[in-house]
Image (cartoon, helix red, strand yellow):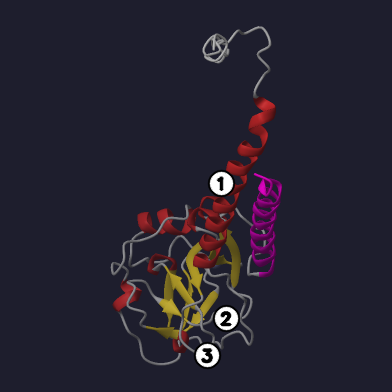
Amino acid sequence: MADEPYRRFASLAASAAFVTLAVILMWLSAGGWDLSGSKGTAMKSELCNHTRHLPDGRDLFQMVCAFGGTERAFSGIHDHKEFNGSGVYRCACCGAPLFPLDAKFNSGTGWPSFTAPVTDAMGYRKDILQYGSTEVHCSTCGAHLGHVFDDGPPPTGLRYCINSACLWYDEFASAIVAASSPWILNAYLVLLLLTGCCASCCVFSKHAVVVAQPYLQKPKADRVDVEATPVPRANAFADA
Ligand SMILES: [Zn+2]
């Protein structure tokens, strides 16, 4: 077992490398180390226009936008209702412009999807309950909107997956998308790093136990091992 210390060091180094890489990637991606996630959603309801008609219902609006829930796929009106022109999807709470109509595309996921938001319209934070995926909220009022993923179409390659209950369409306004896009950490990459870290820790633990085992065994000086005591045998050749 001469190579046990080396294996233990290699396992420990691999675990540290996985953790370091995950920390750096989380820090570089949109939202940084804001880990409050869905449960940390804090919509400023005093900024809401409570007289506004909400086609998907006020109860659903509260559940999704105020408390960070998710509406059923294919259930929202803005997933299947198409508009013509150059309008803007606004926040259902405060009315801030969020997405131009021409940024909308059919993702087939069951939620309204957009390639890019209006400049400074989005706030980002990590949803640690969903493997570090990136949650988006209205930067004005804090209403929870949905998540953003890195599997969208050109030109941004992003897919803002938004709950219909948090949107209303203003056909008389117009807006342009932000000139730059944030870097979104791939949730599967985070899952892969966590798996690698756990596997390395398991290997490290195994070898740590193997190396430490001789030191954990107490000396049994007072114990007489009858079975192990060699029994004197008569010398078969003594009488010869
Ligand atoms: Zn808002």
Q: Which residue is mark 1?
A: 202
User: Is any part of residue 146 visible from this angle?
Assistant: yes
Q: Position of residue 66 (x, y in %)?
A: 48, 55
Q: Tag 2: residue type? A: Val
Closest to the observer, 156 or 211? 211
In front of the other: 142 or 200: 200
Q: Is residue 14 magenta?
A: yes
Question: Disc 1 residue type?
Answer: Cys
- Mainly helix, strand or loop, the magenta region? helix
> Alpha-carbon distance for marks 3 and 1?
42 Å
| Residue bearing the label numbered 2 | 118
Of labels 3 and 2, earlier in sequence is 2
In the picture of the structure, the residue carrying the numbered disc 3 is 155
Q: Amino acid at mark 3?
A: Pro
Magenta stretch: residue 16 in it?
yes
| Beta carbon at label 3 within 8 Å of ligand 1 | no
Vertical placement of residue 84 versus 215, above or below? below
* Above or below 167: residue 58: above
Helix, strand, or loop for circle 1? helix
In magenta, the rendered stretch is: 1-28
